[in-house]
Structures are given as C-alpha cells and as structure tokens.
Image (tube, rainbow, N blue to C red):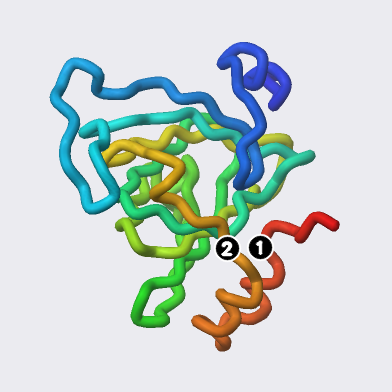
C-alpha cells in the first residue's frame, strides 16, 4: 500500500508553512518574468502538495495569483473558499465524480482558502500557480482579522486557522 511516508520520501517533500508537505516541481525559467504590482514573477510555477493524517489541514491563507489544484492520489481533500464579497464555497477535490468530487479546482487570486483531508492516510495534489508563486504574495490567516472580515464563518475560521504559537 502506498502511504504518506512513501510520497514524502519519493517526492522529496518538506513541511509547508500552511500545513502539509510540498516541493516546487516547476518554474518557468525559460520565459521572461512578468511584471506584477508586487514585482517580477515567473509566468508559472507548480508544486506537489500532500496532506496527511498527521498534518491534515492546509490552514487559511490568501494568494494573489490564480491557482489550479489537481488531485493525484489518496483520499479526497475538502476546500473552503471565502470570496471578497463574503460568499463561502466548499469544493471536494478527489477521484469520484459520483460523490460530487472534482479532479481540478480553480481558485482565483484574492480568495481565502483552507483545506483538510477528508479521511484516510493522505491526499496528494499538484498546484499550478500563475503568475508564479512568491511568498510575498501569500498571507496566512489570522483569526481576529478573518473573524472581522467574515463573521458569519466564525466556526470555519476558528477550525482552520493555524494555531498561534506561544
């Protein structure tokens, strides 16, 4: 049986600040960088991303770039999306369309996102990011800020915010 530990070792994954594990798999070095309000970026980057039983949550975060998520292996992953206009949407990235799972999920830049492993040992996905990912374009969710912005989603915000280290 293929396990989370197998993928971590086979893909050379490292712990991610959002939770889970990742490794960059591509950056468009062969193309000129593009100008964004925050500076020059690759036109496209991609990563492998893994949630596991031991690290099942991708905590609330906001990216400026558009991101496509692709499910590859393991269990389904549930995404919670909070849009600038206050809407909440849930999507399940997985292999079974008869259970309303999708193989690909598009998340526009400027949308708050949290994810969690639905069940099982692991869920492996890839993400393609355009313009390419840069840590300065990402914000981790802070409970007080998100509660002020989205008070009607207090339970989800508390559940998926990264714990404050003391």
Q: Left or right: where does residue 161 sit relative to residue 106?
A: right
**Relative vertical location of residue 1 with respect to residue 71 in this rendering, above or below:** above
Mark number for residue 160? 1
Please state the horizontal and vertical placement of residue 161, each as a whole percent of the image: 66, 63
Q: Left or right: where does residue 59 sit relative to residue 103?
A: right
Mark number for residue 71? none
Q: Residue at x 37, y 50 (%)?
A: 105
Circle 1 crowding by C-alpha within 10 Å: few under 14, some 14–19, many from 20: many
Q: Mark 2 points at which residue?
A: 141
**Relative vertical location of residue 86 with respect to residue 157 in this rendering, above or below:** below
Q: Left or right: where does residue 156 sit relative to residue 26?
A: right
Please state the horizontal and vertical placement of residue 115, each as a whole percent of the image: 57, 54
Q: In which quarter of the image is the C terminus?
A: bottom right
Q: Looking at this view, is 102 or 55 the one in front? A: 55
Q: Which residue is drawn at 45% across and 58% down?
A: 62
Image quadrant where residue 153 sits:
bottom right
Question: Which label sits in the foreground, 2 or 1?
Answer: 2
Q: Which of marks 2 and 1 is nearer the N terminus?
A: 2
Q: Residue at x 21, y 33 (%)?
A: 43
Whether label 2 touches label 1, CB < 8 Å? yes
Please state the horizontal and vertical placement of residue 150, each as a whole percent of the image: 52, 82
**Relative vertical location of residue 38 with respect to residue 85 in this rendering, above or below:** above
Of all residues, the one furthest to the right in this rendering is 166
Q: In which quarter of the image is the N terminus?
A: top right
Q: Residue at x 37, y 30 (%)?
A: 46
Q: Distance between the residues labelled 2 and 1?
A: 9 Å
Image quadrant where residue 13 sits:
top right
- SS class of the residue under badge 2? loop
């Amino acid at each position: 049986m293929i396990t989370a530990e197998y993928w971590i070792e086979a893909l050379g994954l490292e712990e991610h600040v959002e939770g889970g594990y990742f490794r960059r798999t591509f950056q468009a070095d062969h193309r000129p960088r593009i100008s964004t309000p925050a500076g020059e970026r690759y036109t496209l980057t991609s990563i492998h991303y893994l949630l596991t039983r031991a690290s099942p949550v991708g905590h609330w975060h906001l990216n400026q770039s558009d991101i496509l998520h692709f499910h590859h292996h393991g269990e389904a992953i549930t995404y919670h999306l909070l849009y600038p206009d206050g809407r909440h949407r849930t999507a399940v990235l997985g292999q079974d369309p008869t259970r309303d799972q999708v193989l690909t999920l598009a998340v526009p830049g400027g949308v708050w996102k949290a994810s969690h492993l639905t069940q099982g040992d692991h869920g492996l996905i890839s993400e393609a990011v355009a313009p390419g990912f840069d840590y300065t374009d990402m914000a981790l969710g802070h409970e007080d800020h998100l509660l002020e912005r989205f008070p009607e989603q207090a339970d989800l915000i508390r559940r998926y915010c990264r714990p404050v280290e003391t």
